[in-house]
Image (cartoon, grey):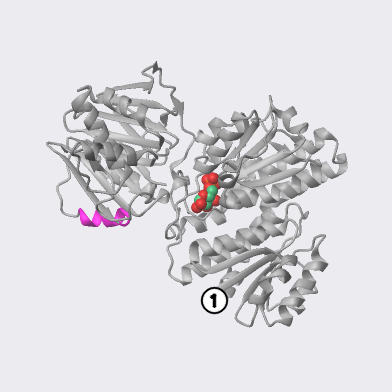
Amino acid sequence: MCGIVGYLGKRDAYSTILKGLKRLEYRGYDSAGIALLDQDLRVFKKKGKVADLEQHLNGEKLTGHVGIGHTRWATHGEPNDINAHPHFSPSQKLAIIHNGIIENYDAIRTDLVNKGHKFESETDSEVLIHFIEDIQNHNTSDLEEAVRLALTKVVGAYAIVIISKEDPDMLIAARKGSPLVIGLGKDEFFLASDATPIVEYTNEVVYLNDSEIAVIKGNDLKIKNTEDVHTTPYIQTLDLELETIEKGGYEHFMLKEIYEQPKSISDCMRGRLNAEEGYLVLGGIREYANKLENADRIIIIACGTSWHAGLVAEYFFEEFCRIPVEVEYASEFRYRNPVIKEGDVVIAISQSGETADTLAAIELAKSKGAIIFGVCNVVGSSIARSSHEGAYIHAGPEIGVASTKSFTAQLIVLSMIALGVAHQRGTITEQTYRQMLVEMETIPEKVGKALKLDTQVKYIADLFKDARNFLYLGRGYNFPVALEGALKLKEISYIHAEGYPAAEMKHGPIALIDEEMPVVFIATNDSSYQKVVSNIREVKARKGKVIAVVTEGDSIIPKMAEFVIEVPATHEALMPLVSVIPLQLLSYHIAVMRGCNIDQPRNLAKSVTVE
Ligand code: G6P
């Protein structure tokens, strides 16, 4: 949801910032822009991708060692050149990049218009830089103080970086709600929404906290909060390899990430689970472990794919721990006055750890005394930091906007949490517990086997690439997989797809079925297998085209379905880890065949830091 980059040092600012923006493009790609400070402060911006900006600037003399850049996911104002960031202040002595939403921008804008301000864009960000300059003109000439005063008046979320023509060796940054990392090089500083633009230059970083302002001047970094209280920067070492954020020979990040799953799943279990010794320990869940074990109920909050992982976890926790679970869309949860009691347990799932709705839902639950367990991928992210305890999924950076390897790693972490709780509560027998641990260790290999179905899935994709609608049906643990399969297809191929519990089909979606309708059944051999077979018959009776994901060796469904994709057998509670693989591949191939932008689907962003 908008990526921001800043640089101050000895390198060429333009190329450094441009490269950084390309790494952050997953956060939004409606427009891109750069401000460079050399003799003058110049702003260049363009609707479209970072590559469009690059092409637009081809031949320009772009010198300077200080600059800021932005890649946008539009919130206020349509994506065009004018609404693109950076935005100038009225005097054009200041420019700002902003990720987030200033909620009271309208009131501030009206005040400023009454004072004679004229705005070029429709953005809240331009209002903020006007506001800062207005304070500088009337209250204090000191920019640092003007920024601080402005931020005390601002309601909403922001990560901002400001560059000033009059202070050529200074950048001012601040955050509240939206992420911001500062990379500390030798006599140089990098600022970015996440660490990916920084890692190739330095592994020393400072994560800015909410309501903090960073002032970089020459070789000096100073941090204070909006109350003007200074703090010592807490320097952390990045644990991120450059190769993990590059395509490594794959045509798209999404494909690379699908193929990484055997490894990401192993990484997720490494050091935490050892079946032979019956060992299962999540180092991040200690002090509050008893809260989980003694919970009367568990509330899971998440969005998108993470919400689907939460649904699988609901089945898992209820089956093995016998604790009631409610899975909530974070966006609904936060606005419906939910009943939360002191000591209630909330599990928040988020790949990015920055999703605004999930973060706000956490804050709400915390304010009512709930204990929050975060399940995040991005280390040091806002959700990870605002949780009481939690477990990282260690899937490695996920760059493709459509989430794949994070889903499976989330399932592994949630299964580990649930099995640990069940074991402590005594709601699982020692034998089943041991068997589940053994089965979990086989999952990377089984996922590897499922990936070998790629050629077959590609063949099916070719036959159905022009379909206008798809139905995905599953029951039990495979119901959330149906939702996830449909979401993947929608996201990247723009084909309308619906996921449904297979048995609910007869209460509506069955009306859609005719010979034009491909229906993907996730029909592996589990406790609802026979029921799903009946549902397949119902679809066949109405001439629907059935593509079925079944367990290897199935002898019934191949006689009914047009296409059968056989995945390795596993415990039904772990089957989503395997059955989702062909669905990821199906959506990938269909989208490629339709000429869609795989890693940056239209209108989407990977990290949704606005509500
Ligand atoms: C966006 C992404 C989805 C993701 C969802 C939740 O919509 O495009 O892929 O599932 O946000 O993101 P989170 O980072 O909280 O898991």
Residue at the farthest left position: 39
Task: Please state which of residues 328 and 241 is positioned toward the viewer in this rendering.
Answer: 328
Q: Residues within 10 Å of mark 1 (few under 14, many from 20)?
A: some
Dominant secondary structure, magenta:
helix
* Left or right of 150, for residue 237: right
Residue 197 visible here: yes
The answer to whether 48 appears left or right of 360 in the picture is left
Residue flagged by tag 1: what amino acid is it?
Ala
Task: Please name whichever residue, 527 or 443, is drawn nearer the observer in this view of the structure.
Answer: 527
Q: Which residue is mark 1?
A: 467
The relative height of residue 234 versus residue 292 in the rendered view (above or below) is above
In this picture, is 462 found above or below 339? below
Which quarter of the figure has residue 175? top left
Residue 422 higher or lower than 520, as above or below: above
Residue 218's spot in the image, x, y percent? 24, 24
Pinpoint residue 542: horizontal percent, then vertical percent. 70, 81
**Does 56 appear in magenta?**
yes
Mark 1 Cβ and ligand 1 under 8 Å apart = no
Q: Which segment did they paint magenta?
A: 48-57
Q: Please tell me which residue lies in front, 173 or 581.
A: 173
In this view, 227 is above or below 412:
above
The residue depicted at 64 percent of the width and 46 percent of the height is 328
Counting labels gives 1
Residue 65's x, y, as percent?
21, 35
Residue 162 occupies quadrant: top left
Instruction: Assess whether residue 535 is covered by the magenta stretch.
Output: no
Image side of residue 200 versus residue 90, left or right: right
Q: Position of residue 327 (x, y in %)?
A: 67, 46
| Label 1 SS | loop
Task: Name the quadrant containing residue 47.
Answer: bottom left
Identify the residue at horizontal 18%, vertical 39% (top origin): 116
Q: Is residue 210 left or right of residue 445?
A: left
